[in-house]
Image (tube, grey):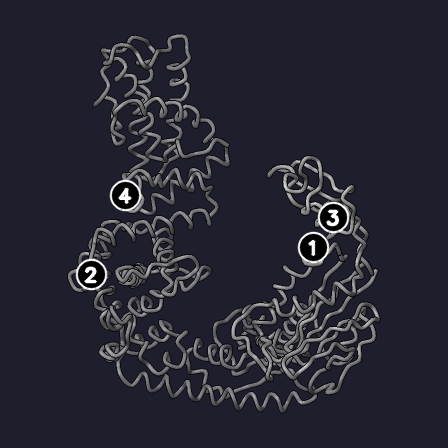
């Protein structure tokens, strides 16, 4: 068995492309080998800023010989009156066999001519020479470039190519106009520590050979070294490194031979908000901030940079990086001090100059709209007068920091700086917190707003965006969602669920659309806009419930989108939808659902032949006990009377376990109604008796439908 090495050497690659390219190779290279009947024992992927590499172990030197059935023309075209036609002779000739060796076989599409051939295995080296260019130029990514005068595209120019099968060099040529990159045995060592070619004699031992040139090609090992070194150097100042996973991943692909270097800056800059210092370090400089031990939030006047230079020059590297961060922090301090010269409210008029969307006006216009929406939500939620006042103040100020110098420099700090500037302007803590929280969650894994004021303003902001963009007809399609409307709707649903917010979304949408249509010319059909938004929210609720582990059929059962009453209920109280779906999943998992499933479904199937309204629950309103002919009917009626308060309590308290307990208690009574010694024929010849019995079944169905449409549930 042989080992194959491919190394593609380049100018410095973007860190994001290195990780992406290795992931693409992981999913592509082994399957492409298997398609060629080559099954390696191991495939290892390596990458640094200057190279992508793969080492494939356990390759045979040649494919095994194999037999293959080759399909030819239809039998009807190949033979006429038992004699071969030109189609048959031509096929035989193309496969190098005689007509006598052809066989006719039946397939799904009729009879065809086949020939069984022995295919000799090809040399592995020959196959690899064909696959390598496909592996290289099959990579995808952003901002590919051309270089030289050729048409090849790659994130950075390709400078060298190593392709070895054990000790044998495979001749592979990448032509790019007048530039030609020919495979060789020479790689490149570290630019500073080993600035000369590095000869690789054989594929095995590639990692060790590169380490001799001060290049660690294994990203996992570089990551481990960076973590160990960063945590070690901060011990000198009794600090703790602040290590974000995203920055660690990026830095791992920015260096070939990592050296953690501790730098420092003037303590006076610690007066800046922690978020500003951290943003300056992480986003602009790729530094790790240092805080006090024991997870204290306060930073120390130090940072850690991961150098790709000479470890012996660590002091010089630290001084140089210190000068850079001091300049960056000086800019930040200037912005911070300048922004606080005027109250946060003074920035609000400047939002007129910031366009939200061309057809929807400025951000100042958006603030006016979201303030009105926030008042609607506050009224619906019955907030206290003090909270309603805070909602209005936070709504007015929530976008003001967008026109400050600091947020202009660091857009990622929107909301963060708004909170700081609100406090320095004398705003209440509730208002300041809401300014920050109204942006939450910023992504799928982000925290949710914790205060009611922040929750209300955040929902109002997103509702304004959804109504406005939908009114322009710019609905998300496929993977395209330039206005992040799915994320906005997801946030509204998740915040409502987490905060147990009594939000009637259907009524709120009607109000917001009506207000919007009165001011905007973009709304031409309010009913259509309402329907589109309701459908959009139902899709998001469906997706989020399934993401939370609820089976798809149980989601169908609580949404029942073919029943307007159910969809209206879902949007009138999204909390209830979540409660019912998660409860259904719980009772499916513990087996309780199976105990009532057959009884409810059997009743529902027969009740469909009646005319009982789905909303009726009280048996006294629709059942005539004088028409009972068997004790089982009276028992059924009595069980429904006992079930009524359980169902009403479940609706009021959103506690559906008592409803299910009532259904389980009624199950044997219903079974006796169908199959017991005093069972009845539901479809009696007497129409009054028949209707009475169908109504009994319809009432049971209706009680169960308070929880879910059991007809949508698949028996497990």
Q: Quadrant of the N terminus?
A: bottom right
> Would you name the residue on which mark 3 appears?
92
Q: Are marks 1 and 3 in contact (CB under 8 Å)?
A: no
For the residue carrying disc 3, how many other residues have a C-alpha within 10 Å: few (<14), some (14-19), or many (20+)? many
Residue 178 place in picture, x, y as percent:
65, 84
Left or right of residue 357: residue 413: right
Task: Determine the CA span between mark 3 and mark 2.
Answer: 74 Å
Q: Is residue 471 something that shows in the picture?
A: yes
Q: CA distance from mark 1 to mark 3?
A: 26 Å
Identify the residue position indicated by label 1 in the image.
35
Q: Position of residue 482 (x, y in %)?
A: 38, 65
Q: Is there a contact, CB below 8 Å, between mark 2 and mark 4? A: no
User: Does residue 555 lie above or below 403 as drawn?
Assistant: above
Local secondary structure at mark 1? helix
Whether tag 1 and tag 2 are in contact, CB under 8 A, the answer is no
For label 3, the SS is helix
Q: CA distance from mark 1 to mark 2?
A: 58 Å
Q: Position of residue 113 (x, y in %)?
A: 69, 42
Picture quadrant where residue 367 is located: bottom left
Which of the marked residues, 3 or 2, is nearer the chain's N terminus? Answer: 3
**Residue under pointer 4:** 568
Element class at badge 2: helix
Q: Residue at x 52, y 69 (%)?
A: 295
User: Circle 2 is placed at which residue position?
Assistant: 516
Q: CA distance from mark 3 to mark 4?
A: 68 Å
Work out whether mark 1 precedes mark 3 in sequence or the reverse, and give the earlier one: 1
Residue at x 48% of width, y 75% of height = 298
> Do tag 3 and tag 2 residues touch (Cβ < 8 Å)?
no
Of labels 2 and 4, earlier in sequence is 2
């Amino acid at each position: 068995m042989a080992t194959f090495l491919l190394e593609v050497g380049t100018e410095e690659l973007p860190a994001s492309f290195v990780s992406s390219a290795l992931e693409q190779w992981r999913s592509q290279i082994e399957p492409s080998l298997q398609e060629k009947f080559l099954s390696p024992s191991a495939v290892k992927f390596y990458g640094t800023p200057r190279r992508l590499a793969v080492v494939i172990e356990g390759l045979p030197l040649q494919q095994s010989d194999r037999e293959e059935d080759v399909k030819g023309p239809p039998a009807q075209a190949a033979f006429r009156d038992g004699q071969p036609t030109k189609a048959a002779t031509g096929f035989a000739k193309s496969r190098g066999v005689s007509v006598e060796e052809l066989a006719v076989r039946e397939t799904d599409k009729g009879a065809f001519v086949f020939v069984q051939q022995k295919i000799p295995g090809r040399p592995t080296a020959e196959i690899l020479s064909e696959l390598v260019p496909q592996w290289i130029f099959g990579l995808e990514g952003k901002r590919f470039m051309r270089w030289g005068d050729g048409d090849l595209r790659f994130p950075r120019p390709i400078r060298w190519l190593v392709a070895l099968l054990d000790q044998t060099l495979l001749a592979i040529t990448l032509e790019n106009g007048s530039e030609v990159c020919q495979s060789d045995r020479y790689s490149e060592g570290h630019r500073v520590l080993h600035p000369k070619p590095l000869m690789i004699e054989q594929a095995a031992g590639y990692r060790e050979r590169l380490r001799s040139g001060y290049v660690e090609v294994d990203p996992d090992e570089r990551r481990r070294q960076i973590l160990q070194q960063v945590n070690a150097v901060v011990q000198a100042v009794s600090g703790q490194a602040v290590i974000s996973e995203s920055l660690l991943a990026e830095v791992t692909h920015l260096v070939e031979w990592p050296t953690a270097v501790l730098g420092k800056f003037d303590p006076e800059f610690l007066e800046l908000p922690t978020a500003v210092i951290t943003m300056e370090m992480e986003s602009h400089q790729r530094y790790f901030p240092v805080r006090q031990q024991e997870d204290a939030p306060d930073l120390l006047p130090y940072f850690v940079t991961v150098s790709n230079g000479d470890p012996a020059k660590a002091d010089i590297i630290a001084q140089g990086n210190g000068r850079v961060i001091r300049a960056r922090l000086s800019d930040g301090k200037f912005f911070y001090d300048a922004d606080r010269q005027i109250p946060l409210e003074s920035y609000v008029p400047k939002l007129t100059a910031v366009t939200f969307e061309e057809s929807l006006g400025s951000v100042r216009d958006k603030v006016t709209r979201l303030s009105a929406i926030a008042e609607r939500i506050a009224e619906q939620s019955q907030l206290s007068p003090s909270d309603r006042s805070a909602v209005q103040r936070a709504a007015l100020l929530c976008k003001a920091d967008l026109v400050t110098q600091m947020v202009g420099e660091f857009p990622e700090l929107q909301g963060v700086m708004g909170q700081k500037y609100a406090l320095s302007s004398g705003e209440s803590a509730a208002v300041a917190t809401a300014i920050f929280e109204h942006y939450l969650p910023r992504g799928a894994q982000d925290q949710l707003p914790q205060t009611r004021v922040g929750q209300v303003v955040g929902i109002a902001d997103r509702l304004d965006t959804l109504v406005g963009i939908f009114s322009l007809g710019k609905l998300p399609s496929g993977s395209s969602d330039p206005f992040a409307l799915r994320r906005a709707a997801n946030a509204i649903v998740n915040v409502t669920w987490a905060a147990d917010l009594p939000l009637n979304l259907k009524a709120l949408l009607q109000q917001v659309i009506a207000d919007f249509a009165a001011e905007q010319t973009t709304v031409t059909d309010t009913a259509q806009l309402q329907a589109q938004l309701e459908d959009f929210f139902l899709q998001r609720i469906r997706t989020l419930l399934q993401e939370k582990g609820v089976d798809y059929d149980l989601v169908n059962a609580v949404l029942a989108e073919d029943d307007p009453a159910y969809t209206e209920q879902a949007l009138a109280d999204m909390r209830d939808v979540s409660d019912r779906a998660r409860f259904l999943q719980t009772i499916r998992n513990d087996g309780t659902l199976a105990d009532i499933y057959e009884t409810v479904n059997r009743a529902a199937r027969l009740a469909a032949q009646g005319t009982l309204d789905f909303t009726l629950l009280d048996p006294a309103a629709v059942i005539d006990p004088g028409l009972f002919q068997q004790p089982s009917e009276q028992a059924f009626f009595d069980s429904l009377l006992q079930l009524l308060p359980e169902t009403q309590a479940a609706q009021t308290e959103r506690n559906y376990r008592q409803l299910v307990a009532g259904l389980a208690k009624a199950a044997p009574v219903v079974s006796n109604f169908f199959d017991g010694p005093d069972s009845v024929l539901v479809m009696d010849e007497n129409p009054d008796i028949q209707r009475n019995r169908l109504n009994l079944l319809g009432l049971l169905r209706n009680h169960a439908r308070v929880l879910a449409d059991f007809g949508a549930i698949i028996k497990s």
